[in-house]
Image: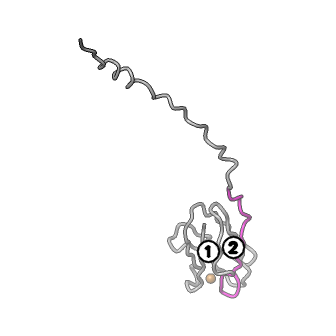
Amino acid sequence: MRTLLMTLAAALALGGAALAQSPAPDPSAAAKPSPSPTTVVHIKNFAFAPETVTIAAGGSVKFVEDDDTPHTVTATDNSYDSGNLDKGQSFTHAYEKPGTYAYLCAYHPYMKGTIVVK
Ligand SMILES: [Cu+2]
């Protein structure tokens, strides 16, 4: 007498495909940097002050022209440009992506500054 068990193996192979996915954790509960307040850089005495600022991604920097001489805030890669700023004027730019952003004054290229975005 013989016993054939091959059909049993085929039946077992069809089991086990129904693993439930666990629900994703609530993303709003995660630590998220809150929108940072606008950081201010003053333009005075032919310099940006502070020369380097660090902000969170999505934050803005407001450049305030306090000098008697006109200046600009011009990205070194020309991605943005304030145009001419006279005393009392300001220019605000938002930095969306992390990175290091160099800028200068188009009238006085030795005036340089850096925005570090985390
Ligand atoms: Cu200048």
As shown in the figure, which amino acid type bears the numbered disc 1?
Answer: Val
The picture quadrant for ligand 1 comes to bottom right
Element carrying mark 2:
strand
Residue extent of the magenta highlight = 32-49
The residue shown at (56%, 72%) is 101
Of residue 33 and residue 114, the one placed in the foreground of this image is 33
Q: Which of the numbered marks, if any, corresponds to residue 106?
A: none
- Tell me: residue 30, above or below residue 101: above
Of residue 44 and residue 95, the one placed in the foreground of this image is 95
Which quadrant holds the C terminus? bottom right
Q: Is residue 101 left or right of residue 41?
A: left
Where, by quadrant of the figure, is residue 106 drawn? Answer: bottom right
As shown in the figure, which amino acid type bears the numbered disc 2?
Answer: Phe
Residue 104, image x and y in percent? Answer: 57, 79
Q: Residues within 10 Å of mark 2 (few under 14, many from 20)?
A: many
Badge 1 vs badge 2, beta-carbon distance below 8 Å:
yes
Residue 94, image x and y in percent? Answer: 64, 63
The residue shown at (55%, 68%) is 99
All told, the count of numbered labels is: 2
Of residue 117 and residue 111, the one placed in the foreground of this image is 117
Where, by quadrant of the figure, is residue 66 drawn? Answer: bottom right
Q: Which residue is mark 1?
A: 73
Which quadrant holds the N terminus? top left
Element carrying mark 1:
loop
Q: Which residue is mark 2?
A: 63
Q: Residues within 10 Å of mark 1 (few under 14, many from 20)?
A: many
CB of mark 1 near ligand 1 (< 8 Å): no
The stretch drawn in magenta includes residue 24: no
The residue shown at (43%, 25%) is 15
Q: Is residue 96 left or right of residue 29?
A: left
Q: Earlier in the sequence, mark 1 or mark 2?
A: 2
